[in-house]
Image: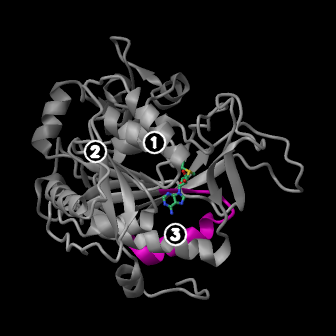
Amino acid sequence: MFLQYPNKKTEEEILLGASKVNLVSVFGSGDNRLIRGDNLKILKSLLDDSSLKGKIDLIYIDPPFATNNHFTIGEDRVSTISNGKDDKTAYRDELVGSEFLEFLRERLIFLRELLSENGSIYLHIDYKIGHYVKIIMDEVFGIDNFRNDITRIKCNPKNFKRKAYGNIKDLILFYSKSKNPIWNDPKEEFTKEDIEKLFKKIDKDGRKYTTIPLHAPGETKNGPTGQEWKGQKPPKGRHWRSDPKILDEWDDQGLIEWSVNGVPRKKIYADERSGKKRQDIWGYKDYQYPTYPTEKNIDLLKSIILASSSPNSLVLDCFCGSGTTLQAAQEFGRRWIGIDQSDEAIKITQERLKNIPPSFFVNRTDYEYLEAQEHTSKEIDINTKSLSAHKFKERKEKILVKENLVRI
Ligand SMILES: C[S@@+](CC[C@H](N)C(=O)[O-])C[C@H]1O[C@@H](n2cnc3c(N)ncnc32)[C@H](O)[C@@H]1O
């Protein structure tokens, strides 16, 4: 199922048609990069770098939502995101309908090419356009790689004037590149009520527990889990959860509870569980006093990074706004790339990065700040394929010096 709309390009037209830019280093160095400019051209340029193509493990994006709004920042940034006449433009969200969808689709195609085979992408969007975006993402990433439509509760209930239910949620569409994404199986702590409800029994030492059947669905024809144990065969169509030798050990350790009718069940202790499986409705409300319009809650980003990246992962946000994703990645010692075209966003991100305290993982926030510069007719179009980021920078600097364009 595909969406059809006017001026929808083929993937080939998008991949070949987008123009590249020069990424001019302005200051800093290191594995992390903050880049100012239009993300389509920058993504195309990054894709030429063999150290990046197919190497990004996690992408989070929170693009404009096709709201036809103009987002501004007032003088008193802490208290208001207003529309006063002296306010500065943070960004304009002016593309709507199919133009917006094609804008996003173009970027998603490049992002897919940058994702590693174990990579994942999370796309934050609202309930008005989100369902169309889902169809576009199915097309770009494959419906089999769709993992979740996460509901994010963004605010407290409000008294909307519209004749409709109040809207307190937006959504995050989560896709993987393949069947085997990095997945750290995040858990939520049990609440007191959960423990009361789920672990109703108490043993002689006062520990709370529950019991589960000692057998699971599916028959084992020849293996040990289909054999008799303590004079009992597993019920028809089921097999023992473990080899009878292990069942003996569990029984010796008092981990099996026998009913009066002689039915064995496995004991599960509350204090041995790391929590319950995380579900697809999340909190993380927006800040009441953001530093940047539509700034997301940093804890949301931290949870995504912990769930879907490894310590050596590279994380990308090409609509990075105030840099929340970059901060979260930095705090957990992941490498990162952030892109935004707004001067205000870049300023606020730089300020944020300066203020990240040293963490257990990383002492200092080192990063290279680059600006996208349009290719000029004078300039040599360097084939950056297979150049490492470092080599790329070196060569680019030499050429720019020659052209007297350098700003480093
Ligand atoms: C919703 S905001 C992101 C907010 C961010 N998640 C945060 O927590 O602060 C969207 C951002 O996308 C940026 N943006 C929009 N179109 C862009 C483009 N073509 N290239 C780069 N950045 C773009 C805007 O400048 C804006 O900062």
Q: Secondary structure at mark 2?
A: loop
Q: Earlier in the sequence, mark 2 or mark 3?
A: 2
**Image disc number at residue 323:** 1
Residue situated furthest top in the rendering: 205
Question: Dot 1: few (<14), some (14–19), or many (≥20) neighbours within 10 Å?
Answer: many
Position of residue 380 in the picture relative to residue 95 (left or right): left
Q: Which residue is nearer to you in this view: 337 or 56?
A: 337
Q: CA distance from mark 2 to mark 3?
A: 24 Å
Q: Secondary structure at mark 1?
A: loop
Q: Mark 1 near ligand 1 (CB under 8 Å)? A: yes
Asked if residue 186 can be seen in this view, the reply is: no
**Image disc number at residue 32:** 2
Picture coordinates of residue 384, whole percent (x, y) = 20, 69
Picture coordinates of residue 106, whole percent (x, y) = 46, 74
Question: Dot 3: few (<14), some (14–19), or many (≥20) neighbours within 10 Å?
Answer: some
Picture coordinates of residue 257, whole percent (x, y) = 31, 30
Give the magenta part as a residue range: 123-145
Q: Which residue is nearer to you in this view: 316 or 248?
A: 316
The amino acid beneath tag 2 is Asn
The amino acid beneath tag 3 is Leu
Asked if residue 320 can be seen in this view, the reply is: yes
Residue drawn at x 89%, y 49% is 161
Residue drawn at x 15%, y 26% is 252
Q: Is residue 62 above or below residue 16?
A: above
Q: CA distance from mark 3 to mark 1?
A: 20 Å
Question: Dot 2: few (<14), some (14–19), or many (≥20) neighbours within 10 Å?
Answer: many
Residue drawn at x 16%, y 53% is 390
The amino acid beneath tag 1 is Gly
Q: Secondary structure at mark 3?
A: helix
Any magenta on residue 183? no
**Image disc number at residue 104:** 3
